[in-house]
Image: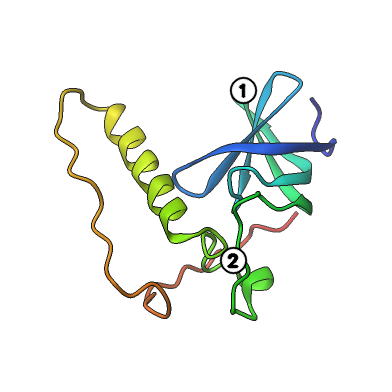
């Protein structure tokens, strides 16, 4: 695998924070802001210490579970990367990510789940800004 190489593949799972994992030719490739089951064309952007990162060129196929949203900024802002996932799928993904993070540090704990409020839309009050993420 070489830097700037164009690849295609399906995201198998997403690690915290928002890193989709795709496997191509036996190599694990990490791509930001993706969802499990989505198929992408991407460009290898970084190869360092055995870790390969890529940037999205095109979304080739949505995941089978994805739903339409009412947000006009979905494609340009990436502020709500899980918005096209049904709520139950979002919660399952978040539980898996939290458990994966905890399992690295301990075993034999009593996981009590993740609390989620009743309001599912228009509740976000956090903004994240990224700078210097361009090629």
Q: How far apart are the two marked residues, 2 and 1, measured between alpha carbons?
A: 27 Å
Kindly identify which residue carries mark 1: 50
The residue drawn where x is 38% and y is 39% is 96
Q: Nearer the viewer, residue 127 or 67?
A: 67
Query: Label 1: few (<14), some or many (≥20) within 10 Å?
Result: few
Residue at 28% from the left image edge and 62% from the top image edge: 116
Out of 11 and 92, give the one closest to the viewer: 92
Q: Position of residue 7 (x, y in %)?
A: 82, 36
Q: Image quadrant for the C terminus?
A: bottom right
Relative to 105, 27 lies left or right: right
**Closest to the observer: 31 or 120?**
120
Q: Earlier in the sequence, mark 2 or mark 1?
A: 1
Hey, which quadrant is residue 75 in on the image? bottom right
Position of residue 114 in the picture relative to residue 5 (left or right): left
Q: Residue furthest top?
A: 26
Figure coloring: rainbow
In the rendered image, which quarter is residue 107 located in?
top left
Cβ–Cβ below 8 Å for labels 2 and 1? no
**Left/right of residue 21 with respect to residue 40 in the rendered view:** left
Give percent across and percent down for residue 65: 59, 52
* Residue at figure coordinates x 39%, y 41% from the top left: 97
Report the front residue among 89 and 21. Answer: 89
Image point (23%, 57%), residue name: 115
Vertical order, 135 against 9 (above or below):
below
In this view, the mark in front (2 or 1): 2
Mark 2, secondary structure of its residue: loop
100 lies above or below 69: above
What is the crowding at mark 2: few (fewer than 14 residues within 10 Å), some, or many (at least 20)?
few
x and y percent of residue 3 in the render? 79, 34
Compared with residue 48, is residue 57 higher up or lower down, i.e. above or below?
below
Residue carrying label 2: 78
- Element class at badge 1: loop
């Amino acid at each position: 695998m070489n830097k700037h190489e164009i690849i295609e593949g399906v995201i198998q799972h997403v690690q915290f924070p928002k890193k989709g994992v795709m496997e191509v030719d036996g190599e694990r490739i990490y791509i930001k802001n993706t969802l499990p089951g989505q198929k992408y064309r991407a460009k290898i952007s970084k190869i360092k210490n055995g870790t390969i990162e890529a940037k999205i060129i095109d979304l080739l196929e949505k995941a089978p579970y994805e739903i339409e949203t009412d947000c006009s900024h979905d494609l340009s802002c990436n502020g709500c990367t899980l918005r096209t996932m049904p709520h139950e799928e979002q919660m399952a993904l978040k539980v898996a990510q939290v458990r994966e993070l905890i399992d690295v540090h301990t075993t034999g704990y009593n996981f009590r789940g993740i609390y989620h409020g009743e309001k599912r839309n228009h509740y976000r009050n956090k903004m994240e800004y990224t700078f210097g993420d361009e090629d």
